[in-house]
Amino acid sequence: MLTCAASNRSGADSSKIDVSRGEETGYIGKRVLDLTLAIVVLALASVPMLLIGVLVKLTSPGPVLYWSDRVGHDNYIFRMPKFRTMRVYTPAVATHLLGRPDQYLTPIGGFLRRISLDELPQIWSILIGDMSLVGPRPALFNQVDLIALRVESGVHRLVPGLTGWAQINGRDELSIPQKVQLDVEYMKNISLFMDIKILWLTFHKVLVCRGVTH
């Protein structure tokens, strides 16, 4: 049975930002790029995020943010935030395993997911070093099949990302082996140019809402 390292970074001192994180498995300056763009996005999106938070609270009982246990760099477990798009009684499994996920969506959950606005709180995870702007999407702690394939291929050594090569090449439409294969392609070709390309293509795909099935 595969076991993930149980180190949890959410208890760490978040006021100390490590600018070197990400360069161990990426390129020089990747962490600086993450911090710079995350701060810019936070400044531009702070008011929209506040409005989204109010709408989430007004349209569905429960907390504004949903925190899930995710698998990060070298399989450490961290807490990742999203704007809550599902009702509070939704099982804590990957969305594609819910059978009929639409029945669990909040009134504005589908809209937030279609244009990925629910991901905005992950800027916090980027700022404290749990995530990068670009990398494999962090697996849920109980996605054992995905975690095992990433360990086998070495992808677990990468810092997980807000977006990634798999996200712009199919996202929810991909099988787990296909996702890992794309993660491997990213790992072998990681560079500043690759990250900028993925960020640009992500922005385009969000605008046309491609690759999101629910």
Image (cartoon, grey):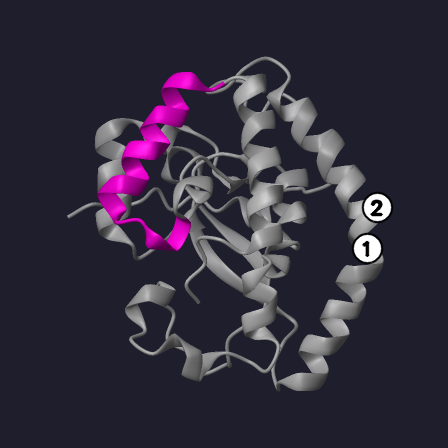
Image-quadrant location for residue 93: bottom left
Describe residue 34's horizontal placement relative to residue 185 as left or right: right
Which residue is outermost to the top?
28
Estimate the x, y position of residue 128 in percent, counting from the top left.
Answer: 65, 40
In the image, is residue 154 above or below residue 130? Answer: above
Image-quadrant location for residue 36: top right
The answer to whether residue 187 is magenta is yes
Mark 2 secondary-structure assignment: helix
User: Which residue in the structure is indicated by mark 2?
Assistant: 43
**Residue sitting at x 23%, y 42%:** 177
Region of the chain picked out in magenta, as a range:
171-190
Describe residue 183's horizontal placement relative to residue 30 as left or right: left
Estimate the x, y position of residue 183 in percent, counting from the top left.
Answer: 36, 33
Mark 2 Cα shell of 10 Å, populated few (<14), some (14-19), many (≥20): few
Disc 1 vs disc 2: Cβ atoms closer than 8 Å? yes
**Residue sitting at x 76%, y 43%:** 41
| Prevailing secondary structure class for the magenta stretch in the rendered image | helix
Give the amino acid at mark 2: Ala
In the image, is residue 167 above or below residue 99? Answer: above
User: Which residue in the structure is indicated by mark 1?
Assistant: 46
**Residue sitting at x 41%, y 63%:** 213
Residue nearest the observer in this picture, 214 or 52? 214
Quadrant location of the C terminus in the rendered image: bottom left
Estimate the x, y position of residue 209 in percent, counting from the top left.
Answer: 54, 56
The numbered disc on residue 76 is none
Measured Cα–Cα span from mark 1 to mark 2: 6 Å
Image-quadrant location for residue 115: bottom right
In the image, is residue 135 above or below residue 11? Answer: above
Describe residue 70's horizontal placement relative to residue 22 as left or right: left
The answer to whether residue 45 is magenta is no
Mark 1 Cα shell of 10 Å, populated few (<14), some (14-19), many (≥20): few
State whether residue 6 appears in this view. yes
